[in-house]
Amino acid sequence: MPQPKSTTILTKGPESGDRRAAPLKVGFVSLGCPKNLVDSEVMMGMLAQSGANLVPRAEDADVIVVNTCSFIETAQQESVDTILEMARHKTEGRVQKLVVAGCLVERYRDEIRRNIPEVDALVGTGELGQILSAAGISQPATLDSPFTILNSRPEGDARAAQGRFSRETWDGAIADLPNYLYDEATPRVLATPGYTAYIKIAEGCDHPCSFCIIPQLRGKFRSRRFESVIAEAERLAHSGVREITLIGQDTTCYGEDFELKDGLALLLEKLAGIPDLRWIRFLYAYPNKITGRLLETIASHEKICSYVDVPLQHASSTTLKRMKRGGGADIFLRMIDKIRRTIPGVTLRTSFIVGFPGETEKELEELCEFVRAAEFDWAGAFAYSDQEGAGAFLQRNKLPAREIESRRKHLMQIQRRISRKKKKALIGQEFDLLLLGPSDESDLLLEGRTVMHAPEIDGKVFVNDLPEGIDPQPGQFYRCQVTDAHDYDLVAKII
């Protein structure tokens, strides 16, 4: 099924900065998740405020910045391939500097220096403020210094003492963990269409998941100030943004480092009061952090999308124990039942890791049975990726890659059948549609999203019929009726 776009060429932004002669031209490539995209937007904002021009084509740039992902092996390979591709614009074209930023820098800083000599500067996830010097721009006195959060949760402090954030064996990792987190005053240039934007409300992660190195890449969990998030949302709404998506490694822990109880629910309630916003959603909920107050808040506010994204990773309690996640199929089914009872018509999304070390056929079947019982609206499955530095790297009984992929495909065949049934049940129903514009599939189709569709990661709504006299505009909302359905996508007419 559709997965998040892994590569975004950032093409938006002002075409001129301070009117000096021949301003520096900078091109960006952002890889990975929306959280990484926000980091790219922040770096673009710093550069634009300092007079640089942001250009859409790599061949036109003086400086190219590649913001990398290092979450799993395929993401690492894509990052390396993209760096090498951009390096050719330096060796064969007009590009003068190549800057590599992001998670791959935290993981392989020295190795990048050794093996890719075309790279001129490295910017880690906690060093976004260094993008100016990396690009060759002197930082003006008027540019705000990077904003850092020093708060922490007791869980984070305890796990730090247990070595959760250790990077001693990593090639070139600096001693200090990343602690950067932008605020409402940080310059930012959106790379998304003007009607939709992400807001990062927290950074880092304290969870002990044994398959994951994000805590080492991003540092301890830290929340943005409540007032900072609201101020940014209000500014975005004033600029024309109608949909905001709250993101973080774990949005449901928001505010805990400020001793704020049900911080995400409080934040959503406040955001729902911003008049110009139409849709508000959040991603990446942690299962045991979904409170009754949070569900009731979603249910009671029309602007908050009835959409819950809770990556469960598995359903076998024994596998989850090895993952250091906790939970199991019965616990999760009770949680899902509570979500559906509290929020009528809710859309549920999850993701799983298949082929975790030691996963038996019985454990896989537990997962498959759970997926059949839960009937998620959207579900993705990822093949386990062995990451040095993660706890699972040292575990035994690892499965061959071919077997892992076979298991992943089997699980997704089950989900495909569930998705087809659920999408067919929508035929004849009416929804509000956010129009995105012409479809990439055909010039004869338009494309849009409903509250059931998060940006980039879920299926599509193809529009093949509209009333006479309507001039459909991207970024506008229309009422539509579903006329047909496929495995993951819908066909609709504007009414």
Image (cartoon, rainbow, N blue to C red):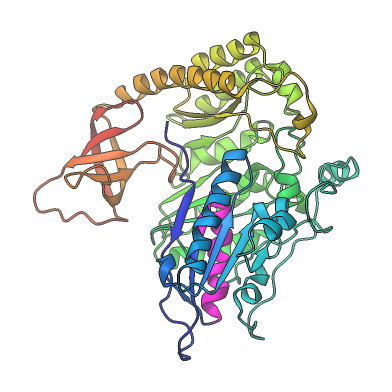
Is 352 or 151 nearer to us in this picture?
Answer: 352
Q: Is residue 38 magenta?
A: yes
> Is 308 contained in the magenta span?
no
Q: Residue furthest front?
A: 92
Residue 219 visible, this orientation: yes
Give the quarter of the figure containing the C terminus.
top left
Given residues 405 and 410, the one toward you in this image is 405
Left or right side of 454 for 355: right
Magenta part of the chain:
29-50
Judged by its main secondary structure, the magenta piece is helix
**Residue drawn at (73%, 25%), measured in percent from left and top?**
326
Question: Can the viewer see residue 12 in this picture?
Answer: no
**Residue 169 horizontal/vertical position (percent):** 83, 46
Note whether 213 is above or below 420 in the view shown: below
Examine the rendered structure and indicate whether residue 288 appears above or below residue 447: above
Q: Is residue 39 or residue 432 the one in the foreground?
A: 39
Whole-percent x, y for residue 264 in the image: 63, 46
Residue furthest to the left: 468
The N terminus sits in image quarter: top left
Residue 274 spot, x, y in % from top left: 48, 59
At 29% from the left edge and 33% from the top edge, which residue is drawn? 490
Where does residue 290 sit, x and y in percent of width and height?
63, 34
Task: Check the image and name the residue furthest to the right.
Answer: 161
Residue at (57% x, 39% y) in the render: 74
Image quadrant of residue 444?
top left
In the rendered view, tell whether residue 274 sits above or below residue 186.
Answer: above
Q: In the image, is 295 to the left or to the right of 103?
A: left
Residue 206 sits above or below residue 349 on the image: below
Q: Is residue 293 left or right of residue 482?
A: right
